[in-house]
């Protein structure tokens, strides 16, 4: 009986193919957008999480001032000094590495080539914290760091731009605005970061050299610290905060005038945002599903009226009310279910296209796929019940006489 | 087998109420072939629909064997039609865009028979009415006489005890009409009770008894010694 009703429903849909297609489109769009939204959302947050983790999920960023929302720092901003760095490094066992970081964008010159790149003043711990290895050469040595000697470590993009393919690079001198430095090391390629900027477009110099020749001050505006593997990030964060509060003599009544932030916090923020977006878009998709369901109800009501005669004939040959009910209910379930299947296929295709276009991970969530399919059938039941009952409650003789 | 006592049927209520059947008493034995005649509007179809349980009387008693049909629920009446009755209508009442085979299958499907059995039995029934070469034709591709034969196959496929026919030849020319009547007469000879409404004397001549209705009452009965 059910099997038969199923095939009967398929036949009925084929008989009114155009109308069925147009009716199911609401469901197709609804399901496709739900699938696409969820998959793209998950893919995006997965990609972001992955690349943030590559940056180092055990990394802390220590900055003067309090960040109160994006780009809105508190009034008092006292930069760190070398002594702060030394104290953190020597007194905190939890830290694996800690390095000051300062950036500038400058033109560098080699032979007759000019190239604008990122100059970054760091110490060797920067490479540890970033988990960044040298492909060739060596890191800075102690005296180079202390006295700020004219040496540098170059990234892959800089090399590709300035040097000929087979050229010997180590030992060559690169000129900057007012000084030159000898290349002592070559960084491994790191590729683009989460936000798409090329991390290999870089030239590292000793931090003290940067201070002396570029920034011209002894201020430190950023320190990057890597926390030892077996120590929780929050614990290290609390230790750093306590130490800095002590050094800066901040009493309990006052807020920190610095901030210690981690990439995991960033991940949390991002996933929060993507979750909210997913929910909102999901709600929009759900509304379109309801609209699709109403479309199905509408067309099923039309169909029941059109087929009043048929209902009468079926009742005359012995169909009970429930047989008629099942027939029309299955028809609307099959209609919305087919819409659901097409919607899933379309949604997966859109997710796939989006992953190529947006360069994010491809995530096909099997749970949401199943839920979407079941939900589309549920819509068939919910919106099919009224037309089906209308059909089942017909009086045989009235149905037969219907013109 | 069938006993009607004081069957009345009234449409509407109050001022506009019209009584279409006013106290029909009728007894039909198993294996009989009964024709019902009468002027248009005399209540023939109404009576037939009550006999077929498609409609319910306003008053009166309808006994089928020992069952009081009036007390049956809607579902029970559906089962009664499913297992005991077969219907033929003046307008054929086949499902559109549905092949002969599928049309004939419908009663069997409601009996819960397997797909293969349904197909086999439907084919046999179509063969009996001489349409084995038209099983995949849809009503739109068949002549009136052929459509009515599909309808007969559908009525007979589940081996009913009673065949109910409302002007089965009403839409057909004389020759086709008689072909249809020959078929119905064959089924009657096999023991099936036939109750038929007709306007034409020569069609009624196939029946063993003719009942004349006028204004919702039985005017006379004529027995035809066979
Ligand atoms: N649903 C209804 N509501 C009101 N009156 C009805 C209804 N059905 C039938 N009637 C009336 O009942 C009367 C008998 O109708 P019925 O169809 O039984 O006549 P009939 O004898 O079959 O006529 P015909 O030979 O033209 O088919 C008619 O006057 C008709 O108008
Ligand atoms: Mg009539």
Image (tube, rainbow, N blue to C red):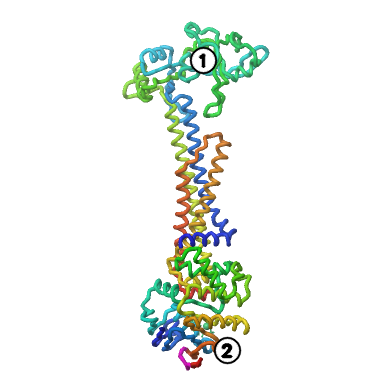
Label of residue A121 in the image: 1
| Magenta stretch encompasses residue A211 | no
Query: Residue B115 appears at what percent x and percent y?
Result: 50, 63
Residue sitting at the far left = A252
Binning the other alpha carbons within 10 Å of mark 2 as few (below 14), some (14 to 19) or many (20 upward) gives: few
Residues tagged 1 and 2 counted as in contact (Cβ below 8 A): no
Label 2 sits on a secondary structure element that is helix
Q: Nearer the viewer, residue A57 or A361?
A: A361
Task: Quarter of the image for the C terminus of chain A: give it.
Answer: bottom right
Label 1 sits on a secondary structure element that is strand
Query: Residue B220 appears at what percent x and percent y?
Result: 47, 94
Label of residue A361 in the image: none
Marks 1/2: CA distance?
115 Å
Which range of residues does the magenta coloring cover?
Answer: B216-221
Residue plotted at (44% across, 75% down)? B81
The quadrant holding residue B202 is bottom right
Image check: B169 left or right of A55? Answer: right
For label 2, the residue is: B202
Residue A179 makes an appearance in the image: no
Residue plotted at (42% across, 28% down)? A264
Kindly report the secondary structure that dominates the magenta region of the rendered protein: strand
Residue plotted at (51% across, 17% down)? A133
Binning the other alpha carbons within 10 Å of mark 1 as few (below 14), some (14 to 19) or many (20 upward) gives: many
Residue A289 makes an appearance in the image: yes
Q: Is residue B111 above or below residue A285?
A: below
């Amino acid at each position: 009986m059910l099997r038969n009703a199923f095939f009967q429903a398929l036949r009925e849909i084929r008989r009114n193919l155009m109308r069925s297609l147009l009716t199911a489109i609401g469901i197709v769009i609804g399901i496709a957008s739900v699938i696409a939204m969820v998959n793209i959302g998950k893919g995006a947050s997965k990609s972001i999480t992955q690349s943030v983790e590559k940056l180092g999920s055990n990394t802390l960023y220590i900055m003067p001032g309090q960040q109160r929302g994006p780009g809105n720092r508190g009034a008092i901003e006292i930069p760190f000094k070398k002594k702060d760095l030394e104290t953190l490094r020597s007194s905190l066992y939890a830290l694996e590495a800690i390095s000051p970081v300062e950036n500038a964008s400058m033109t560098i010159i080699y032979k007759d080539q000019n190239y604008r790149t990122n100059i970054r003043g760091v110490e060797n711990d920067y490479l540890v914290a970033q988990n960044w290895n040298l492909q060739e050469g060596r890191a800075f040595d102690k005296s180079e760091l202390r006295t700020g000697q004219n040496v540098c470590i170059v990234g892959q993009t800089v090399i590709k731009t300035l040097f000929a393919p087979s050229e010997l690079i180590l030992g060559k001198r690169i000129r900057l605005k007012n000084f030159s430095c000898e290349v002592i090391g070559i960084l491994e390629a790191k590729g683009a970061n989460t936000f798409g900027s090329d991390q290999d477009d870089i030239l590292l110099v000793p931090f003290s050299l940067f201070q002396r020749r570029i920034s011209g001050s002894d201020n430190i505006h950023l320190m990057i610290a890597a926390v030892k593997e077996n120590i929780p990030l929050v614990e290290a964060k609390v230790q750093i905060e306590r130490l800095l509060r002590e050094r800066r003599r901040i009493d309990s009544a006052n807020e920190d005038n610095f901030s210690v932030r981690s990439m995991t916090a960033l991940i949390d923020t991002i996933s929060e945002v993507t979750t909210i977006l997913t929910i909102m878009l999901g709600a929009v998709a759900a509304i379109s599903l309801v609209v699709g369901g109403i479309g199905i109800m509408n067309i099923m009501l039309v169909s029941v009226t059109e087929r009043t005669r048929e209902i009468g004939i079926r009742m005359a040959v012995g169909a009970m009310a429930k047989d008629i009910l099942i027939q029309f209910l299955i028809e609307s379930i099959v209609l919305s279910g087919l819409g659901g299947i097409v919607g899933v296929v379309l949604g997966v295709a859109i997710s796939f296209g989006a992953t190529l276009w947006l360069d994010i991970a491809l995530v096909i969530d099997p749970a949401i796929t199943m839920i979407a399919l079941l939900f589309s059938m549920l819509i068939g039941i919910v919106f099919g019940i009224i037309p089906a009952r209308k059909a089942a409650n017909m009086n045989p003789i009235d149905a037969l006489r219907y013109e | 087998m069938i006993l009607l006592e004081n069957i009345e049927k009234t449409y509407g209520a109050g001022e506009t109420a019209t009584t279409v059947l006013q106290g029909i008493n009728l007894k039909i034995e198993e294996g009989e072939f009964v024709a019902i005649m009468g002027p248009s509007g005399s209540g023939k179809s109404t009576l037939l629909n009550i006999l077929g349980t498609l409609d319910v009387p306003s008053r009166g008693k309808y006994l089928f064997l020992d069952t009081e049909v009036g007390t049956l629920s809607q579902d029970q009446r559906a089962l009664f039609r499913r297992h005991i009755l077969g219907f033929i209508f003046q307008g054929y009442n086949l499902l559109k865009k549905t092949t002969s085979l599928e049309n004939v299958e419908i009663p069997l499907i409601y009996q819960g028979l397997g797909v293969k059995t349904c197909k086999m039995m439907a084919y046999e029934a179509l063969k009996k009415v001489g349409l084995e070469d038209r099983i995949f034709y849809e009503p739109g591709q068949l002549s009136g006489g052929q459509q009515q034969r599909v309808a007969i196959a559908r009525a007979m496929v589940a081996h009913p005890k009673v065949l109910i026919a409302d002007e089965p030849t009403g839409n057909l020319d004389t020759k086709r009409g008689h072909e249809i009547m020959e078929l119905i007469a064959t089924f009657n000879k096999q023991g099936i009770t036939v109750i038929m409404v007709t306007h034409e004397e020569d069609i009624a001549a196939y029946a063993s008894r003719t009942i004349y209705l006028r204004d919702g009452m039985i005017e006379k009965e004529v027995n035809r010694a066979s």
